[in-house]
Amino acid sequence: MTKVSITVDGVLHESEVEPRTLLVHYLREQVGKVGTVVGCDTSSCGACTILLDGRSAKSCSVLAVQADGSSVTTIEGLAGDEWHPVQAAFKECHGLQCGYCTPGMVLSAVDLLSENPNPSEAEIREGLEGNLCRCTGYHNIVKSVALAAQTMKGGKK
């Protein structure tokens, strides 16, 4: 067992983990952040995407020991008293259907918009290409990210 100290959604968690424990399993099983979903376990789908030190990362491809000393933001910790603008835009534009990919899509979009606050449709599609949705066809997801970008710039409330 190896001791790790990881700040998850603003709360420091010190835990003993098996060295081979994936971050996604640590978050779900030891921290209780079940909004971080297990999709493919091969880093192909992006459902497990979190923000690791502010950058999107697929938590099924990171060992918990690799995140020692880091800060993780999950979908549960993204918003404060109100939804994050990306979450609100996903609701407004119906950027989800079954919702399984939504946490990963939202967190990937947050990272995308932090890097590029005014992305084109092509840039949004490219920025989300590591996240798979089997329900929506992506049209409303792209609309959601575009609306969030506009909202975050103060263009629409």
Image: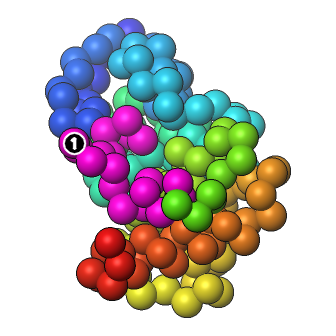
The C terminus - image quarter: bottom left
Q: Position of residue 51 (x, y in %)?
A: 38, 50
Displayed quadrant of residue 16: top left
Total marks drawn?
1
Q: Position of residue 115 (x, y in %)?
A: 37, 77
**Residue identified by numbered label 1:** 81
| Residue nearest the observer in this picture, 90 or 62 | 90
At 49% across and 86% down in the image, what residue appears? 119
At 31% across and 39% down in the image, what residue appears? 77
Q: Is residue 10 left or right of residue 52?
A: left
The N terminus - image quarter: top left
Q: Is residue 76 left or right of residue 107?
A: left
| Residue nearest the observer in this picture, 6 or 131 | 131
Q: Position of residue 83 (x, y in %)?
A: 34, 50
Q: Is residue 156 left or right of residue 145?
A: left
Q: Residues within 10 Å of mark 1 (few under 14, many from 20)?
A: few
Displayed quadrant of residue 155: bottom left
| Residue nearest the observer in this picture, 106 or 128 | 106
The residue stretch that appears in magenta: 74-91
Magenta stretch prevailing secondary structure = helix
Residue 128 appearing in the image: no
At 52% across and 54% down in the image, what residue appears? 91
Q: Amino acid at mark 1?
A: Asp
At 26% across and 36% down in the image, what residue appears? 9
Q: Is residue 149 above or below residue 135?
A: below
Q: Is residue 60 left or right of residue 64?
A: right
Q: Is residue 81 magenta?
A: yes
Q: Position of residue 29 (x, y in %)?
A: 47, 14
Q: Is residue 149 magenta?
A: no
